[in-house]
Amino acid sequence: MDEMKHILEDKKKVNTGRGRTILMILLLFFQLGICIWFGMQKQGFHQDEYYSFFSSNRTSGLCEPDRAWQSAQTIRNEFVVLPGEGFRYGLVAQVQSWDVHPPLFYDLLHTMCSVFTGVFSKWLGISVNLIAFTLCFWILNELLRRLGADDRMRFLVCGLWGCNPMTVSCVMFIRMYMWLTVFVLLCAYLHVRLLQETMQMENPGGKVYYFRFILPIMICSYLGFLTQYYYMIFFFFIGVFYTLWILVTEGAREHQHKKALKDALVYVASCATALMLAVVSYPASAVHIFRGYRGKEAAAEFASAGNFGQRAEFFLGLLNRDVFGGCFYILVALLIISMVIYRIRIRTEMKMVLTAVTGYFLVVSKTALLLGNTSNRYEMPVYGLILLVVIFMARDVILHGRKYRKQATVLLVFLSVFLTMKGLFLDRNVLFLYPEDESRIAYAKENRDVPVIIMYHDQTPDNVWRLTDELLEYPRMYFMSEANKDRITDQTIMSARKLLVYAADYDTQKESLQAILESDQNLKGYRIVSQKDMWTLYEFY
């Protein structure tokens, strides 16, 4: 009877475990569905998203002629992988070496585009990010499990993170930040695991210990570095915390001072080796960080202490509004006051995560570009961990409260879900969708047979790619530099009864527009159709 009872209990545990796994899988699919739904709403691209495709798949490089026609297919070829040009990872690394970013994300995007040869679609980039989203979901789930969260709490945190408008925005933004989130979360998980295992071992060390715990951190850091240099900030702070913890905790044990120092040195040396291997694999990274324009800008901002408060206020404002629905300051204040009253001590693992998150957030706040709400991209990799820390603090406060535990839990869950759904569907805080581009593309489709002039700035001709989704609707375009004052002699332009002119911002723009008007006696005037970034679309009639 006892044996049968144990068998039934084991089966019940297995069935319960399967049920929980199925529930998490359903949550993941629900969130992927939300991302796909917003992907369908995405009508245009950020200029950096165009660069993602261009720098991953380019053939000859964009070349803007002067007083000459160029086909849309020629432009399109620079954003897609052509037959026979797939899986050219050496070229991807070379192109990135000319800019300021490491190549791993571009390798992934190039791989996706190589599988779908000749296709230029937002879904290729979104698909790459959806893979990263799925990895983040499970890493976050395992991190929560490591931190002792029960099933309901793991469901809540993963649900809030995956449905948060900024997480969905990160998926919509075809850049490296979703993959940076993968390695930030993985770095946090691996260090929490390392810390906990070290706590439980009386004498940590040995080959098995290093291969099981140190080597995964090295691999994660190698890949994280090659994804985005901001990874080093998070890695630095979490590594410093762990190193100091080793020295203090192990060093406090009797006759363990030398071993604590040895373990700390081995850890630091391993981390340094991983980063050195990354630099050796991609030598341009050293130039990017120390001599590249973004590296110099970041260093200059970091060295200047005058605007730290203003920058921190700006990024905290984004966090408060876009992640917590305007409740961040109130919530954190209540939690801190409650933790002081109840004398709640923060666990070592949470202290480590909190240290890394705070360090990353503040350093990035000091060095990142200020670009309005799109600056969220720089902090997105730690938004999930911030949600995790806040929810854990709230849980500890609720558990220490003598009354109204159930009511407080229900209120917390309701408020969290309400603010998340409000941000998604009422406030429409999801970024990088560009619904305003729908009308521009529709206008281009309606006028695809009208002659089109691209009047570009001679100092920044590559800004033409900001118009890619519109330009690809026309069979061909006539390019002219605004700095060139020569008379237009092209017969198609001179005889047209209607013209479309995309004019870049330039001091002599009006003179160039007048020159076009004078070159064609059929034209009487022009009007502004739309404006985007540094471009204005004029219709000549």
Image: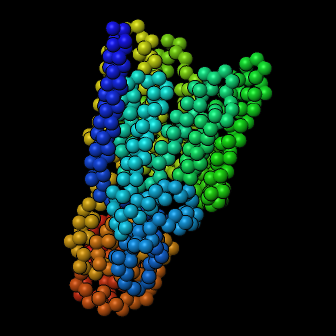
Identify which residue is drawn at 47% across, 80% down: 483
Residues 409 and 334: in front is 409
In front here: 353 or 108? 108
Residue at the far left in the pictured view: 446
Q: Nearer the viewer, residue 40 or 219?
A: 219
Q: Is residue 110 visible?
A: yes
Asked which quadrant contains residue 506, the reply is bottom left
Left or right, 264 with respect to 27, comes to right
Q: Is residue 92 visible?
A: no
Is 185 situated above or below 154? Answer: below
Colour mapping used in the image: rainbow
**Percent coordinates x, y for residue 85 in the rendering:** 45, 71
How many numbered discs, if any? 0
Residue 364 falls in which quadrant of the image?
Answer: top right
**Is 101 displayed left or right of 118 in the figure?**
right
Report the quarter where the N terminus lies: top left
Query: Which sits in the foreground, 328 or 350?
Result: 350
Describe residue 204's horizontal placement relative to residue 67 as left or right.
Answer: right
Q: Quadrant of the C terminus?
A: bottom left
Residue 308 x, y percent position in the rendering: 58, 41
The residue sitting at 32% across, 44% down in the picture is: 32
Question: In percent of the image, x 53 and y 13: which residue is there?
Answer: 343
Q: Residue at x 34, y 76 (%)?
A: 72
